[in-house]
Image: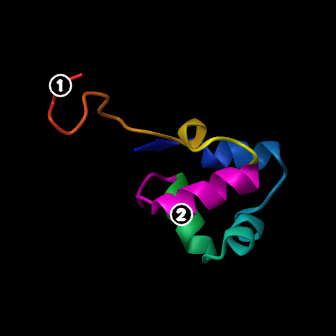
């Protein structure tokens, strides 16, 4: 999964710690999200998007656009 959290966070001038505090997680969770190493729950994705003032699909995209069945 690819993410634009880091870019959006920088755009609004927010640190990882500030974002983590705002959405109720540890800073390490934000680090893993930004690196695409952690798939967030729908609730966390919603909270991060809201905190950054963007839509969820502006933050996250899948590397494999074909979907789970391999079809587009």
Q: Is mark 1 on a helix, strand or loop?
A: loop
Q: Where is residue 72 in the image (x, y as percent from the top left)?
A: 24, 22
The total of numbered circles placed on residues is 2
Residue wearing tag 1 = 71
Residue wearing tag 2 = 43
Write down the region rendered in magenta.
35-52
First of labels 1, 2 by sequence position: 2
- Corner quadrant of residue 22: bottom right
Which residue lies at the image location 80% right of the left edge and 57% below the top edge? Answer: 14
Left or right of residue 37, residue 66 in this image: left
Magenta region includes residue 50: yes
**Which colour assignment does the render follow?**
rainbow
Which residue lies at the image location 56% right of the left edge and 72% below the top edge? Answer: 28
Which residue lies at the image location 77% right of the left edge and 68% below the top edge? Answer: 18
Left or right of residue 30, residue 66 in this image: left
Q: Position of residue 21 (x, y in %)?
A: 73, 74
Q: Quadrant of the N terminus?
A: top left
Q: Which of 47 and 6 is in front in this view?
A: 47
Q: Where is residue 40 in the image (x, y as percent from the top left)?
A: 46, 61
Farthest residue, direction top:
72
Marks 1 and 2, how far apart in space?
Answer: 27 Å
């Amino acid at each position: 999964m690819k993410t634009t959290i880091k870019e959006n966070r920088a755009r609004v001038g927010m640190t990882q710690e500030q974002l983590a505090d705002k959405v109720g997680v540890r800073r390490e969770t934000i680090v893993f999200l930004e690196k695409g190493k952690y798939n967030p729950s729908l609730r966390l994705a919603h909270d991060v998007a809201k905190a950054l003032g963007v839509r969820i699909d502006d933050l996250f995209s899948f590397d494999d656009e074909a979907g789970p069945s391999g079809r587009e």
